[in-house]
Amino acid sequence: MSKMIYLDNNATTKVDNEVLNAMLPYFQNEYANPSNVYSFSKKIKEDIAKARLSIARLINANSNEIIFTSCASESNNTAIMSAVRNNPNKHHLITTCVEHSSILETMKYLESIGYDVTYLSVDSKGRINLEELRNSIRPDTLLISIMFANNEIGNIFPIKDIGNIAKQYGILFHVDAVQIIGKARIDVKAMNIDTLSLSGHKIYAPKGVGVLYVKNDTPYTSLIFGGHQEQSRRAGTENVAYIAGLGKAADIIMNDNYRVNIKISSLRDYMEKKILDTIPNVTIYGDLYNRVPNTSSISFSGVQGKDLLFALDNHNICVSTGSACSAGFLKNSHVLEMMHADLTHSSPIRISLGKYNTKEEIDYFTNILIPIIKKLRIDSNISIRSNRNTVKFVLIKIVLYLV
Ligand code: PLP
């Protein structure tokens, strides 16, 4: 089988070698529990502080505003539930209909216990409308929670403008920044962000480590009670190796990012152009002028994304149909549904590039795509025709039965 080509970097990324090397000492040499008082622990505590500073620099926060968590899902849950618990007299939250499930499911839970949630709509390009946001604000709105960049189509939302609106109305503002980190500059101060989530495994650090930024003086209640780690804001012995890895991943982004993003966006544009030049009837979804540099949500008329995903998988090429399928089954993307995309005869695949992708890989992928799309289109025509024949046959039988 040919070499694997991984084009699903919004789902997860390969751990960078430098990140791995930064993690290794903590498994067997520097393994002390940072909460102890002997010198063996002191060095570990300092290393965690260093990683905290690296993350803080990445988003222009103060070090003491950074809480390490197990993942961005935990960070999102914590931020929302903390806002709710600290605003007992308010019962309304605002989010968008295209958030990640770690936001949407938390909102659904809150609705089930009596809270009101407004889900801002998106237009056919996946954009939100700030007037709709303003009009949704109520005296009892306790939180606005909006993602910075969408994981499926890559759209970047106007976070600075939303931060200004939240500030104007005195409402807490939470940002799921998982898909923007490393792809654009974030400044939590300038953007009036109160809480923000990020995840290690989208930025070449391992799965199982995340961050919650909480602006100083924001009322806060921990989701996990127990020990006094993370200034009593997140109990549980620190995942030192992973925290060190995440700190290193942040340093790499700070040193190298401009060049990496230029490379990735030119590769994405090259890929899209090649596809558009060689395959007819292609649609690219999202706000093409305001996307993260690595993401392309693309459909081929007559072709279902899941059929294309499996056909590409036979050639050892990994793409996705949008939302990851944690339970092992593929659903239509809720993001595309909310954009009212017509998914009856075709649905998109998501291609998300990363810093390890090369032009050779993109050439291989785009070349292999041409015959695959041709074959899937022939197959889908046959099945549409045979569906029509089946319907005709059933109708004739009914008519014959009735006479
Ligand atoms: N938010 C967004 C936008 C995501 O894309 C993801 C993961 O895909 C998450 C949150 C959850 O991150 P984690 O896997 O660290 O829980």
Image (tube, rainbow, N blue to C red):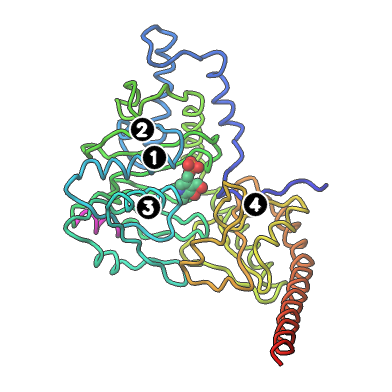
Res 129 label: none
- Residue with the most extreme top position: 38
The magenta region covers: 162-168
The percent coordinates of residue 305 (x first, y second) are 65, 63
| Contact, mark 2 vs mark 3 (Cβ under 8 Å) | no
Q: In the drawing, does residue 221 fall left or right of residue 302?
A: left
**Circle 1 residues within 10 Å: few <14, some 14–19, many ≥20:** many
Q: Which residue is mark 4?
A: 7
Q: Which residue is mark 3?
A: 108
Q: Amino acid at mark 4?
A: Leu
Q: Residue at x 35, y 64 (%)?
A: 120
Q: Amino acid at mark 2?
A: Ile
The percent coordinates of residue 145 (x first, y second) are 33, 52
Q: CA distance from mark 2 to mark 1?
A: 9 Å
Q: Amino acid at mark 3?
A: Lys
- Residue with the most extreme bottom position: 403
